[in-house]
Amino acid sequence: MFILSFVFFISIFFLFLFYFINFFLSNKLLEKNKVSSFESGFVSVGKVQNSFSIHFFVIMLMFVIFDLEVVMLIGLLVSDFNSFFSFIMLLFFVLGGFYMEWWYGKLIWII
């Protein structure tokens, strides 16, 4: 138990040490694009809430869903029939949602 707690405290110590060394030695650029609240490749005009495009959110959501699908696919390797059936259902719903987004034209990237 002593060894485990010793390793834990040494790890925490090095974590904070490297964090503060990185914080104090890093270059901080205070340019206009770096300190702006909406850094997405174009200059926002007006309020930030008005310049947000919903397409960023839709594409981000699709990436998250497909990442979860890949994680479930990896877990399928060591599974039984019930988890295989649930994976097939998830795949059906994901592909159905993807088809629905394609049908309604939400995948067209226009800013």
Image: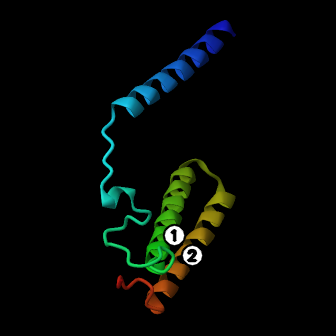
Tag 1: amino acid: Leu
* Along the line of sight, the residue nearer the viewer: 58 or 94: 58
Neighbour tally class for label 1: few under 14, some 14-19, many 20 plus, Cα within 10 Å = few
Tag 2: amino acid: Phe
Label at residue 92: 2
Looking at the image, what colour scheme do you see? rainbow
| 27 in relation to 7, above or below | below
Residue extending farthest bottom: 104
Neighbour tally class for label 2: few under 14, some 14-19, many 20 plus, Cα within 10 Å = few
* Along the line of sight, the residue nearer the viewer: 87 or 36: 36
- Residue ID at (51%, 63%): 64
| 29 in relation to 82, above or below | above
Query: Does residue 69 appear left or right of residue 4 in this picture?
Result: left
* Along the line of sight, the residue nearer the viewer: 93 or 87: 93
Q: Position of residue 49 (x, y in %)?
A: 51, 76
Q: Earlier in the sequence, mark 1 or mark 2?
A: 1
- Residue ID at (52%, 57%): 73
Q: Are marks 1 and 2 in contact (CB under 8 Å)?
A: no
Label at residue 14: none
Label at residue 61: 1
Quadrant of the frame with the C terminus: bottom left
Quadrant of the frame with the N terminus: top right
Where disc 2 sits, the SS reads: helix
* Along the line of sight, the residue nearer the viewer: 25 or 17: 25
Label 1 to label 2: alpha-carbon separation: 17 Å
Q: Quadrant of the rendered structure where residue 3 is?
A: top right
Q: Position of residue 9 (x, y in %)?
A: 60, 16
Q: Position of residue 48 (x, y in %)?
A: 47, 73
Number of marks in picture = 2
- Residue ID at (33%, 35%): 26
Query: Does residue 30 appear left or right of residue 87 in this picture?
Result: left
